[in-house]
Structure formats: structure tokens, C-alpha cells
Image (spheres, rainbow, N blue to C red):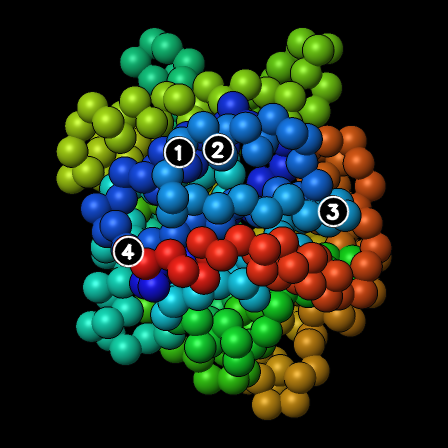
């Protein structure tokens, strides 16, 4: 049985998806199996997955569109086998030692959740040429309590997460964005915190969070690319070439150096809504004290803050989906149908249960 089930949610970006899969295949830790979960994808996604011809790679395509990663992640996680679950977004990349480092840190620390250090990218002038560069790396002193009052970027991307299967079973599936004021991954982290889950931080970049294409898309004047998902995978190709041309140690040195040269404003990982007109409301209501109140009573001070600032359920992800594909975010109460469908599809594949590393 594979030690790690990797869950990779995707939607209709097959040219980009191949780079994420390549970064899995390049892992120094080999005892894994990869479950690509399509969010009602077109047929060309299946063709890309199948093209790798690797018995450790599986594909399930959900019948109903979720419009967000929480549905495919919940479906994939519920089907996971082995002791650990790792997540990888279709537009992100792992350095070759990501799983090796994550599993070693979990074993040494005894923690239940590893959140690695990620390199955040943007698009900027570097040596006289516009190209992807790193402008931030995740802090290494995070606590789960911080998910209550600090920005979601603190724990992004979920591509940097590796967790014990037992903690996922205890916390349960992610919730749909339309049922939440918080993002689904923040909600899951806070539920894990309430149940006493323990966190281990990564101390060096092992994940590249590809944001540069978003910046390039914002500045793009090409009417043939009205949505973010119509952009070609230029950034993924750029970083994949770096991963293959230099050692992980040298690449990490480059990422860290760029993060200092192109550093984002200090509040990038800071308090929620810092630098916005609503920051006083959020700073007043979202504090370490109200975080502890939430932990013991379940009362979330973000809800009255959201009411005071007219923030809607699923608002951020609704806006992101419109930018990505032009769609409206579906309104569903839970992901039970997605989970059931994914499990049914895999039940017909005997290799899923018989596969051993």
C-alpha cells in the first residue's frame, strides 16, 4: 500500500496539469499514488493523465461541477489509502524533496499536519527581462490559531500540506464555499485546531505557488484570453526548467534571494484585511482572545465582522471563479454526492485497492 495518497484537483487545464504531475514523478520519495480528481473536466484531461503510463497514477472525473477545490479534495481525500494525504493544485509545483522532507518532519515531530514553506511568485523585471520571480516565502512560525485572525495566505497553498490520514478522518470533509464566510481550507484548519491537531512547519521552500500567471493575465490585452484559465502554462514551464537544471539547494537559494529583492509589503501574511478600509473592524473582532473563544465555544467573530462589512458567503471564491472561467459558484450544502461518486468510480478499479509500492 502506498504510504501517501496525493490528491490533485483539476479543471480543464491539461497543458498545465502535466507539469504538476511531472513534479510528482520527480519526487525522491517514491512510495505514493496519485489521484487526479477532475471537476467535470473535458476528455483531454483524461488523455494527459493516461499519457504518463504510470500505474501509480489514477484519474476520477466528477460528474457534477463543483467550481472550487474543496469538492474534488473532499472526494479524493475520502478515497485515500495509506497513512498520509498530500495535496497538490494543478497550477503549482513541488521541489523533488517535498514529500521526503514533509514525511520526515511529521515522523520526527509526531505532528499530524505538515505545512511546508512555499515560494509565492509574481511577474516582474528580472535582469532586464519580464519573467516569473518570487516575492514572498511562507513564515516558519505559524500556529493553527493564526488561521483565525490572519490572512489566508499564511497557510497557502494547500499544495504545501501533508497530513496524517487519521486527522482527516477526525476533522472530516471540506465544506463548500457558499456555506462559509471563511475559505474552505481555513474552516478545515480551524476545525482541526478545535480538535487538538498539531502542526509542523516547513523550514525551507518545497513548493512553488505559481501566481505570476495571474499578474500576467491581469495585464494581458489579448481578447482571446478573457479568463485566467485560457492562459498557456508559461510559468509552470519556466519553473519546471529551473527544477530540472539546478539542484534543490541552489534553487532554494535563488527563491530566497528573489523573495528579499522583490519582497511584498509586510502585511502580506499579516492580520486579516490589513491595509483595507475595514481593517479596524477586523482587528477589533479578530484577536487571539476571540480565537480561544472560538476554540472552546465555536462562536466565530468573523461572522459579525462580515455582517458589518457586507461580506457574503463564498464571496472571495465566487469572484475568483468568475476570473478563472466566467462561471458562477454553485450553491451546495455539502460534498456528499461528489464523495459518493468518486468512491463509486474507484470501486470499479481493482488496481486502486491492490496497488502496492
Cβ–Cβ under 8 Å for marks 1 and 3:
no
Where is residue 80? Give x, y as percent.
Answer: 48, 63
Tell me the quarter of the image containing the N terminus: bottom left
**Above or below, 166 relative to 261:** below
**Depth check, front residue: 197 or 340:** 340
* Residue placed under numbered mark 4 in the picture: 357
**Residue hosting label 1:** 53
Q: Position of residue 222 (x, y in %)?
A: 67, 9
Give how far apart the Cα atoms at labels 3 and 4 are. 30 Å
Q: Are marks 2 and 4 in contact (CB under 8 Å)?
A: no
Marks 4 and 1, Cα distance to the nearest angstrom? 16 Å
Residue pointed to by mark 3? 63
| In front of the other: 138 or 47 | 47
Query: Is label 1 in contact with label 2 (beta carbons under 8 Å)?
Result: yes
Q: Which residue corresponds to the image point at 23% horizontal and 56% vertical from the top-left?
A: 101
| In this rendering, the label closer to the viewer, 3 or 4 | 4
| Residue 121 as seen in the image, left or right of residue 169 | left
Q: CA distance from mark 2 to mark 4?
A: 19 Å
The C terminus: image quadrant:
bottom left
Q: Residues within 10 Å of mark 4 (few under 14, many from 20)?
A: few
Q: Residues under labels 1 and 3: Cα distance?
A: 24 Å
Residue matched to label 2: 50
Helix, strand or loop at label 1? It is: loop
User: Is disc 2 placed on a helix, strand or loop?
Assistant: helix
Observer-nearest of 5 and 305: 5
Amino acid at each position: 500500500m502506498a504510504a501517501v495518497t496525493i490528491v490533485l484537483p483539476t479543471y480543464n487545464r491539461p497543458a498545465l496539469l502535466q507539469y504538476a504531475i511531472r513534479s510528482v514523478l520527480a519526487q525522491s520519495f517514491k512510495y505514493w499514488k496519485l489521484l487526479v480528481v477532475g471537476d467535470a473536466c473535458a476528455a483531454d484531461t483524461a488523455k494527459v493523465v493516461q499519457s504518463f503510463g504510470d500505474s501509480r497514477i489514477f484519474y476520477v472525473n466528477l460528474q457534477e461541477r463543483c467550481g472550487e477545490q474543496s469538492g474534488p479534495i473532499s472526494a479524493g481525500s475520502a478515497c485515500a489509502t495509506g497513512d498520509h494525504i498530500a495535496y497538490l493544485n494543478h497550477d503549482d509545483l513541488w521541489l523533488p524533496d517535498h514529500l521526503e522532507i514533509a514525511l520526515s518532519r511529521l515522523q520526527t515531530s509526531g505532528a499530524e499536519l505538515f505545512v511546508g514553506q512555499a515560494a509565492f511568485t509574481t511577474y516582474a523585471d528580472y535582469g532586464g527581462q519580464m519573467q516569473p520571480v518570487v516575492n514572498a516565502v511562507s513564515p516558519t512560525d505559524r500556529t493553527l490559531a493564526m488561521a483565525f485572525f490572519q490572512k489566508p495566505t499564511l497557510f497557502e497553498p494547500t499544495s504545501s500540506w501533508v497530513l496524517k490520514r487519521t486527522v482527516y478522518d477526525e476533522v472530516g470533509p471540506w465544506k463548500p464555499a457558499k456555506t462559509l464566510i471563511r475559505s474552505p481550507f481555513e474552516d478545515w484548519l480551524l476545525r482541526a485546531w478545535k480538535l487538538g491537531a498539531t502542526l509542523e512547519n516547513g523550514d525551507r521552500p518545497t513548493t512553488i505557488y505559481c501566481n505570476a500567471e495571474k499578474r500576467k493575465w491581469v495585464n494581458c490585452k489579448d481578447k482571446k484570453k478573457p479568463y485566467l484559465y485560457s492562459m498557456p502554462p508559461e510559468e509552470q514551464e519556466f519553473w519546471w526548467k529551473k527544477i530540472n537544471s539546478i539542484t534543490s539547494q541552489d534553487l532554494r537559494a535563488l527563491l530566497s534571494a528573489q523573495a528579499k529583492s522583490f519582497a511584498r509589503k509586510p502585511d502580506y501574511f499579516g492580520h486579516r484585511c490589513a491595509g483595507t478600509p475595514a481593517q479596524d473592524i477586523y482587528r477589533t473582532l479578530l484577536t487571539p482572545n476571540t480565537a480561544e473563544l472560538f476554540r472552546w465555544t465555536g462562536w466565530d467573530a468573523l461572522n459579525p465582522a462580515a455582517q458589518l462589512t457586507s461580506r457574503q458567503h463564498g464571496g472571495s471564491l465566487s469572484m475568483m471563479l468568475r476570473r478563472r472561467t466566467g462561471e458562477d459558484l454553485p450553491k451546495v450544502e455539502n460534498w456528499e454526492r461528489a464523495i459518493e461518486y468518486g468512491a463509486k468510480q474507484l470501486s470499479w478499479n481493482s488496481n486502486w485497492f491492490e496497488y502496492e509500492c
